[in-house]
Amino acid sequence: MGLLLLLVTGILVGWLTTIALRIEDGGEIGRTVAFGAAGSVIVGFAVSSGMVLGSVTAIALLAGLLGAAVFVALFVFVRRRRTAV
């Protein structure tokens, strides 16, 4: 259940980012959502000492939310930097 909760949190962060930045390309939306989900799961896994298959603590969920936001922000920064050059 914890893994599912972290995945949903990351997907929501990625999706909300695409709405806020008005990203309309389907591939970019998919990559942004994937980076949000990956960031949430990786950071949530690290904070909860590798135990995300059972329950998840509030600290792990908040860390997963922050991790998703950081992963998505880095992805958007790198993407914009590549298109600017």
Image: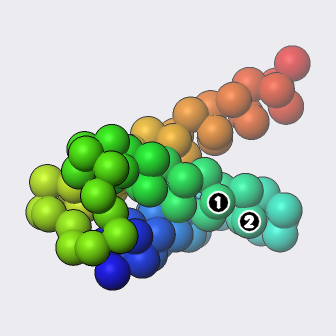
Asked if one can make out residue 59 in the rendered structure from this viewpoint, the answer is: yes
Q: Is 20 or 69 nearer to us in this picture?
A: 69
Q: Is 12 or 8 nearer to us in this picture?
A: 8
Three-letter code for the amino acid on which mark 2 is drawn: Gly
Quadrant location of the N terminus in the rendered image: bottom left
Which numbered marker is on residue 30? 2
Image point 46% across, 69% down: which residue? 7
**Colour scheme used in the picture?**
rainbow
Left or right: 29 in relation to 8: right
Q: Is 17 or 71 nearer to us in this picture?
A: 71
Image point 14% across, 63% down: which residue? 57
Three-letter code for the amino acid on which mark 1 is drawn: Ala
Expressed as whole percent of the image width and height from the top left, the position of residue 82 reads 82, 26
Q: Which residue is mark 1?
A: 34
Image point 25% across, 45% down: which residue? 49
Left or right: 60 in relation to 58: right
Q: Quadrant of residue 70?
A: top left
| Element under disc 2 | helix
Expressed as whole percent of the image width and height from the top left, the position of residue 12 reads 46, 72
| Label 2 Cα neighbours within 10 Å, binned few <14 / some 14-19 / many ≥20 | some
Residue farthest toward the bottom in the current orientation of the protein: 1
Asked if one can make out residue 68 in the rendered structure from this viewpoint, the answer is: no
Quadrant location of the C terminus in the rendered image: top right
Residue farthest toward the left in the current orientation of the protein: 58
Which numbered marker is on residue 20? none
| Element under disc 1 | helix
Real-space Cα distance between discs 2 and 1? Answer: 6 Å
| Label 1 Cα neighbours within 10 Å, binned few <14 / some 14-19 / many ≥20 | many
Q: Are marks 2 and 1 in contact (CB under 8 Å)?
A: yes
Expressed as whole percent of the image width and height from the top left, the position of residue 75 reads 64, 39
Left or right: 13 in relation to 21: left
Image point 27% across, 73% down: which residue? 54
